[in-house]
Image: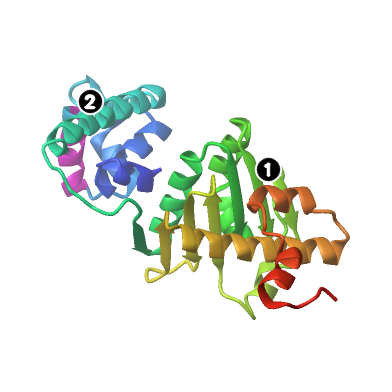
Amino acid sequence: MVAALKELGLTATEGKAYVALLKNHPATGYELAARSQVPRSAIYGVLKKLEAVGLINAIQQKPAKFVPLPPKRLLELMESRFRQNLDTLEGALSQFSVEGPDTVTWTFVGYGPMLEQARALIERTDRTLYVSAWRREILALEAPLKAAVANGIDVVVFSFNRLPQGIGRTFCYDIPEDELEAYWPHRIILVGDRRHLLVGGAEATEDNRSVVTEETPLIEVAVSNLVLDLTLYGQRTGTDLGPVIERLTPPLPPVEALIPRASGLTPA
């Protein structure tokens, strides 16, 4: 909770004080300092800031005791302020016009940014979502994947590890992650509506690198990788994945019929 509050603009000490007050309230500054591990020398400045932004309230004096804004109202307040800030930013940015290519490829560094981009891709998918990832990353993306399924999106997930239920049509082996890590690093592929792609490393490190793109050739390469994994899975398990693969791939040219015309060869 403290980490999430920091992402929304609070400091670590402010987040700790608010969470401690949620657990036990009303409370004095002295009590909160002991429970939140915020130094007594800093606690009253922290409480003053939280009171100024409306996250806590004093209900008595001498000694002052504080109560927290209820969680539901906190979320409503945060959402309102966030939307207001977005509206302000949108108005300010509208005066700038930046010309660029129709399709852009962006590289993201770090494990956290990779997961953020994966969630964003899932949320902007309208029809079909194909995913290839390890169990750890699937668990990190479980909530948006389940939301996509609930919204009627056709979600297909492949993994070499065992996967949770309820995240779409899953095709997975049961190889434990620690055994597979002896041979491969973590990788991830997400293809949304055959128009959006996230691909790259999924190592939980600050220098992990991943790419988000709408470039058609890169999407086609990623799709080919997914088709290969699903085809091999079908062969190994005796599962008919023809309908799944057909939805993932565009109509293929009649190569057997075209070869004789182009080269004079005859089919075997």
> Disc 1 marks which residue?
168
Please state if 81 lies on the left or on the right of 195 as rendered: left
Q: Nearer the viewer, residue 216 or 63?
A: 216
Q: CA distance from mark 1 to mark 2?
A: 41 Å
Kindly state the secondary structure of the residue where label 2 is placed: loop
Does the magenta run of residues contain 127?
Answer: no
Tag 2 or tag 1, which sits nearer the N-term?
Answer: 2
Q: Which residues are magenta?
A: 40-51
Q: Residue at x 21, y 29 (%)?
A: 87
Q: Residue at x 18, y 24 (%)?
A: 62
Q: Residue at x 36, y 62 (%)?
A: 108
Tell me the tag on residue 257: none
Task: Give the residue type at disc 2.
Answer: Gly
Q: Position of residue 236 (x, y in %)?
A: 84, 67
Q: Quadrant of the N terminus?
A: top left
Kindly state the secondary structure of the residue where label 1 is placed: loop
Q: Position of residue 206 (x, y in %)?
A: 37, 68
Does the magenta run of residues contain 48?
Answer: yes
> Disc 2 marks which residue?
54
Q: Nearer the viewer, residue 26 or 224?
A: 224
In the picture shown, does residue 27 fall above or below 93? Answer: above
Please state if 253 lies on the left or on the right of 13 as rendered: right
Q: Nearer the viewer, residue 256 or 41?
A: 256
